[in-house]
Image (cartoon, grey):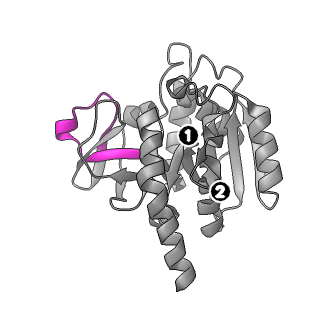
Amino acid sequence: MKPTAIILAAGVSRRMRPLTDDRPKCLLPVGPKAVLDWQFEALAKNDVRDVIMVVGYRKEMIHDYVQTHYPSFHVRFIENPAYDSTNTLFSLSHALREWRGDFFYMNADVVYDARILERLAPGKEGGYLAVDKKQCRDEEVKVEVRSGQIVAIGKHLDPAVCDGEFIGVAKFAGQFAERFRQEVLDLATPGNEMQFFEFALDHLKDKSGLVAIDVTGLPCVEIDFPEDYQYALESVVPRLLAAQGAERDV
C-alpha cells in the first residue's frame, strides 16, 4: 500500500508578494504548469493517489483547482484556521491529528523531479529527507549528518558544518513515523506558533532512522523568495521538461 501524501499549503507567502496577492503560492505558474501540478504529477508517477492538503490562505482556490484538475485523486482538505499566525509545525499537526501511518511530506511550494519520490521509497521504516548537497545560505533549512544519520536540522545551523539543504520533500514510515507524529503533536502548543515542522525533527531525542537521501543533480527548488521563482523558471523547468521529453522518447 502506497503512503498518503501530506501537502502543506496554508501559508500566506508574504515574501512572494505581490505575486501572491491574488492567489496562493502553490498556484503560481511555473513554466506550463502551476507549482501544484508538478507535485500531483510526481505523485501520480509514483502511484500515490491519496492526499491530505492542509489549507488556509485562499483555500477555496486550492480546493476548486484540485477538484477540477485531479478528480482521480482522493484528496482530503484540512484547514489550519490560524494560518496567518502559525507556521508549518501547526499545519502539520492538524494533518497528523487526522492521519496515523506512513506518509510522504511536502511543502506546497516545491517544484521537483518525480524521481525524488522514488528515492524516498525504499520500503522500510525511517525518516527520509531529500537533501541537495551544496553550500547553503543562512535562510535555507540545513542538515548535519554524521555516520549516515541526520543529527541536526534547521535554518539555525552553521552552513560550514552542514551537508546540504533539505528541499521540503520527505517520507516517514513505520515506528519512526509514529514517534515523529507524537513529537509534532506534543510541540504544537502555545509558544511554538512560528516554528517550522523541522523543529519537531530537530527536537527528537532519538533520531535513529533519520537519514538524508541525496537528490543532488535532480531538478528541484523550494520557492521561498522571488529569486527562487526566477531560478525555477530559468533553470528547473527546462530540465524537468527535458527529462519528460526523454521519458517519452524511450
Query: Which residue bears the numbered disc 1?
Result: 181
Local secondary structure at mark 1: helix
Crowd tier of the residue under label 1, counting other residues whose Cα lies within 10 Å: few below 14, some 14–19, many 20 or above? many
Residue 40 is marked as: 2
Q: Nearer the viewer, residue 216 or 205?
A: 216
Asked if residue 132 lies left or right of residue 191, the reply is: left
Asked if residue 99 lies left or right of residue 195, the reply is: right
Q: Nearer the viewer, residue 101 or 15?
A: 15
Asked if residue 8 lies left or right of residue 166, the reply is: right
Residue positioned 53% across, 55% down in the render: 173
Asked if residue 55 lies left or right of residue 249, the reply is: right
Residue positioned 52% across, 65% down in the render: 241
Q: Would residue 120 be seen by someone viewing this image from the given angle?
A: no
| Residue 188 found in image quarter | top right
Q: Would residue 161 be seen by someone viewing this image from the given angle?
A: yes
Residue 28 is marked as: none
Q: Amino acid at mark 2?
A: Phe
Q: How many marks?
A: 2
User: Can residue 122 be found in the magenta stretch?
Assistant: no
Residue positioned 53% across, 63% down in the render: 114
Q: Spot the residue most to the left.
A: 160
Point out the stretch of residues depicted in magenta: 151-167
The numbered mark, 1 or 2, whose residue comes first in the sequence reads 2
User: Can residue 157 be found in the magenta stretch?
Assistant: yes
Q: Nearer the viewer, residue 17 or 223?
A: 17
Relative to residue 152, is residue 147 depicted above or below?
Answer: below
Question: Residue 147 placed where, x, y %?
Answer: 21, 54
Q: Amino acid at mark 1?
A: Arg
Question: Residue 128 placed where, x, y %?
Answer: 43, 54
Residue positioned 71% across, 40% down in the render: 98
Local secondary structure at mark 2: helix
Relative to residue 45, is residue 11 depicted above or below?
Answer: above
